[in-house]
C-alpha cells in the first residue's frame, strides 16, 4: 500500500499482471492504493472498499467474484469506477466494451439516484382512476415516467426472441461495436479546446492524437 498526500484512496484486486495502473498510481504518490485479493478475508476487503473513492477494474466480469462486481461495490460506498473499455490490467482498450460499460454506468447511476418519494410520484389520483383490476400500461403518465424512471438501453436486448432474430440476432458485443462505429464516424462535439488540449499535453508527454476516426 502506497500513501497519498491528499486523502484520495483507491483499491485494486491484484491479478498479478504487470505493469498495471496500480503500479503507476503508487509511483505517482498522489493517492493511497490498496491492493486486495479476491481470496482475502471478505470483511477486510469490504472495509477497504467502503472507505475508498475509486475502484480500478481490469478483469472481465467472469473473473470477478459476484460479491465484488460493480453493483456490489457501488452499494458498498465506492464513488468512482475505472473500467470503461479497459481490459488486461488496463493495457488494452476495446471500443465495444467502452460502449457496454457506458450503458452499465448509466444503470449504476440510476441505482445510486434511488427512488424519489413525493405526493406527485405516488400518483394517488391515477391509482383511483384506474381502480382495482385496471391497467396502467395505457396511461400517458406511465409512458412519461418510463423515460425518466427506467434506463432504456441501446445495447442490452429487450426485444422478444422473434424480433431479435429478425434484426439479425446480434449479441451485445456486435451491437456495441456498431454503436461505437456510429459514434466515431460522426463529428466529435466533445473535443477539447486547443488551450485545454495544450495544457494536458504539456503535462503528459507522448499522448496519441485525440481525433480518432472510424474509417470503414
Image (cartoon, rainbow, N blue to C red):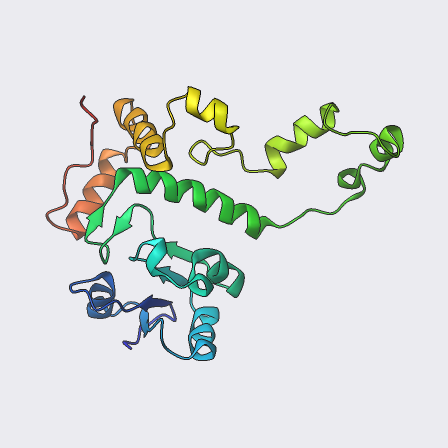
For the point 31% across and 24% down, the residue is: 182
- Left or right, 203 with reference to 186: left
| Number of dots carrying numbers | 0
Tell me residue 80's x, y (percent): 42, 56
Q: Is residue 24 left or right of residue 106?
A: left
Q: Residue furthest left?
A: 206
Q: Where residue 166 appears, x then y in whole percent?
A: 43, 19
**Residue 33 versus residue 55 in the image, above or below:** below
Residue 94 in picture, x, y percent from top left: 25, 42
Q: Eyeballing the image, is 198 above or below 147?
A: below
Snapshot quadrant of residue 19: bottom left
User: Closer to the camera, 164 or 198?
Assistant: 164
Q: Quadrant of the C terminus?
A: top left
143 or 188, nearer to the observer: 143
State the residue at coordinates (43%, 79%).
44
Quarter assignment of residue 142 = top right
Instruction: Locate residue 117, reporting x and y percent.
Output: 74, 47
Q: Residue at x 26, y 23 (%)?
A: 185
Q: Is residue 22 above or below residue 58?
A: below
The quarter of the picture where the N terminus appears is bottom left
User: In the rendered view, would you say 186 is above or below 81?
Assistant: above
Side of 61 where 129 appears, left or right: right
Name the residue rendered at 84%, 35% in the picture: 127
Amino acid at each position: 500500500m502506497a500513501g497519498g498526500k491528499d486523502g484520495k484512496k483507491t483499491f485494486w484486486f491484484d491479478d498479478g499482471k504487470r505493469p498495471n495502473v496500480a503500479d503507476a498510481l503508487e509511483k505517482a504518490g498522489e493517492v493511497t492504493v490498496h491492493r486486495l485479493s479476491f481470496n482475502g478475508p471478505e470483511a477486510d476487503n469490504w472495509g477497504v472498499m467502503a472507505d475508498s473513492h475509486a475502484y480500478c477494474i481490469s478483469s472481465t466480469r467472469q473473473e470477478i467474484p459476484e460479491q465484488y462486481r460493480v453493483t456490489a461495490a457501488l452499494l458498498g460506498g465506492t464513488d468512482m469506477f475505472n473500467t470503461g473499455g479497459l481490459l488486461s490490467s488496463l493495457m488494452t482498450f476495446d471500443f465495444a466494451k467502452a460502449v457496454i460499460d457506458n450503458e452499465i454506468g448509466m444503470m449504476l447511476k440510476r441505482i445510486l439516484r434511488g427512488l424519489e418519494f413525493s405526493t406527485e410520484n405516488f400518483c394517488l389520483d391515477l391509482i383511483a382512476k384506474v381502480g382495482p383490476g385496471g391497467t396502467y400500461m395505457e396511461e400517458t403518465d406511465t409512458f412519461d415516467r418510463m423515460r425518466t424512471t427506467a434506463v432504456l438501453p441501446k445495447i442490452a436486448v429487450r426485444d422478444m426472441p422473434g424480433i431479435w432474430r429478425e434484426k439479425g440476432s446480434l449479441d451485445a458485443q456486435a451491437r456495441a461495436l456498431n454503436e461505437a462505429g456510429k459514434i466515431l464516424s460522426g463529428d466529435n462535439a466533445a473535443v477539447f479546446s486547443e488551450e485545454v488540449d495544450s495544457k494536458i499535453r504539456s503535462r503528459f508527454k507522448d499522448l496519441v492524437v485525440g481525433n480518432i476516426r472510424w474509417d470503414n
